[in-house]
Amino acid sequence: MVIKGYDDGPLVAGESLLARRGFWSNYLMMCGDGSSPVPEWFGDDGADTDALSEVLFDPERWPVFRVPTEDGPGAVVIYRNLVGDYGIDYLLTQPGRSHAQQIASWEGELSGAGLTWHELLRLAESPSPAEGVEDPAARLLLILPLLADLELPESASARLAAALTSVGAPHDSALSTAEHLLTCLARRSHHDPTWGSPLSGS
């Protein structure tokens, strides 16, 4: 696989991994405090998570998850499996541009540009028929780590909980899991409304 503008490693399409047990517990364990998420929050168990981590973190095959949109910027999530320099890179694709632009990376915490809640929803809810992730719930969860917004609407937790249950999280704990994830994301540096959004192409 080739992503123009990103030449760091052996990229492979990763979208088929989204349906595997253990994916979301690997991907969304983004908090490092004493109440970090556990696999059961996402409908997985430790064996699921461990087994899939060997696939996700393989230095010979870097999974790529594409979130294309119908008529606007899209996103690409790449597991950067360099030995000794593991991370997850977040890229944006812009209409009319041939190369993707890296806007953020995760290496224990996110660095780079973030998006508002409404920008995340626009990306999640505008799937393109091009190759990539089409399910709005999975799209939202893939780009969720980019959230950097202090002004979340009251509906955000319920919207996120619905996405979690759609990908297999238990109904009875999905809302508390969603609230936990949003709280963890809120501890990071936040979007300054005076800054231009990465989605603007600036």
Image: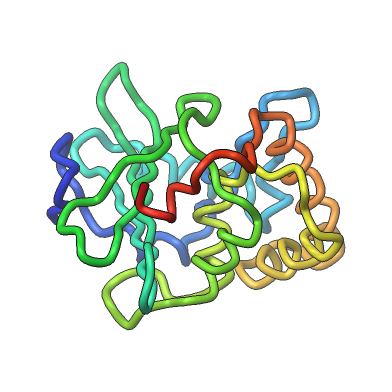
Residue most toward the front? 194
Q: Residue at x 57, y 58 (%)?
A: 141
Q: Position of residue 62 (x, y in %)?
A: 26, 43
Left or right of 202: which side holds 162?
right
Displayed quadrant of residue 67: bottom left
Q: Residue at x 77, y 53 (%)?
A: 152
Displayed quadrant of residue 191: top right
Viewer-proximal residue among 76 and 152? 152
Q: Residue at x 53, y 58 (%)?
A: 21
Residue 97, relative to residue 38: is it above or below?
Answer: below
Left or right of 146: which side holds 55?
left
Residue 57, relative to residue 34: is it above or below?
Answer: below
Q: Position of residue 24 (x, y in %)?
A: 56, 53
Residue most toward the bottom? 129
Q: Residue at x 43, y 41 (%)?
A: 53
Viewer-proximal residue among 164 and 112? 112
Q: Position of residue 190 (x, y in %)?
A: 65, 34
